[in-house]
Image: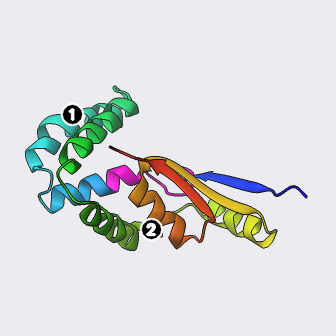
């Protein structure tokens, strides 16, 4: 017997933004990432994208580079704690249509799989919140 699976991308499909954006903001707020990194490196790329003069990928790449650099010396437990806080505070910020589709697939007995380019601890928290059967996120080594 074949099993049906429904795959949902978190960033922009379930969640109304990118989860990496939320974790980056939290890292700046708690001074894990210095405010000057936001002001000098990320904000110019964000402003260019926001004005439709720059590319979203440039903005995203700046955040990812700083995230990877910053988290190299941080324990996995600390990163998981940040992920939990982000999902606790922002996890309801999802599209209604997608929320209904998740529930529809669940009622039909389909496997629910969450995927994302966001860091795996964030994807894990979001997948658990919405009771997905499995998930895959980016692992930064």
Residue for point 21% across, 57% down: 27
Residue 125 in picture, x, y percent from top left: 45, 66
Figure coloring: rainbow
Left or right: 129 in relation to 112 = left
Give the position of the C terminus as an image quadrant.
top left
Q: Quadrant of residue 122?
A: bottom left
Start and end of the magenta stretch? 11-22
Left or right: 66 in relation to 123 = left
Q: In which quarter of the image is residue 91?
A: bottom left
Which disc is residue 114 wearing? none
Judged from the image, the secondary structure of the residue bearing numbered disc 2 is: loop
Residue 71 in picture, x, y percent from top left: 22, 50
Kindly identify which residue carries mark 1. Answer: 44
Left or right: 39 in relation to 117 = left
Kindly identify which residue carries mark 2. Answer: 91
Residue 12 on the magenta segment: yes
Residue 37 in picture, x, y percent from top left: 13, 42
Residue 66 on the magenta segment: no
Judged from the image, the secondary structure of the residue bearing numbered disc 1 is: helix
Vertical comparison of 5 with 87: above or below: above
Q: Quadrant of residue 36?
A: top left
- Visible residue check, residue 10: no
């Amino acid at each position: 017997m074949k099993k049906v699976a429904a795959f949902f991308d978190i960033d922009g499909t379930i969640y109304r933004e990118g989860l990496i954006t939320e974790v980056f903001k939290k890292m700046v707020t708690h001074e894990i990432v210095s405010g000057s990194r936001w002001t000098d490196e990320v904000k110019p790329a964000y402003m260019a994208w926001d004005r439709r003069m720059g590319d979203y990928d440039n903005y995203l790449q700046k955040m990812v580079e700083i995230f990877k650099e910053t988290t190299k010396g941080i324990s996995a437990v600390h990163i998981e704690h940040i992920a939990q806080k982000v999902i606790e505070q922002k996890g309801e910020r999802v599209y209604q249509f997608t929320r209904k589709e998740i529930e529809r697939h669940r009622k039909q007995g389909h496997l629910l799989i969450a995927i994302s380019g966001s860091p795996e601890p964030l994807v894990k928290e979001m997948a658990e919140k919405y009771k997905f059967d499995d998930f895959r996120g980016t692992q930064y080594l």
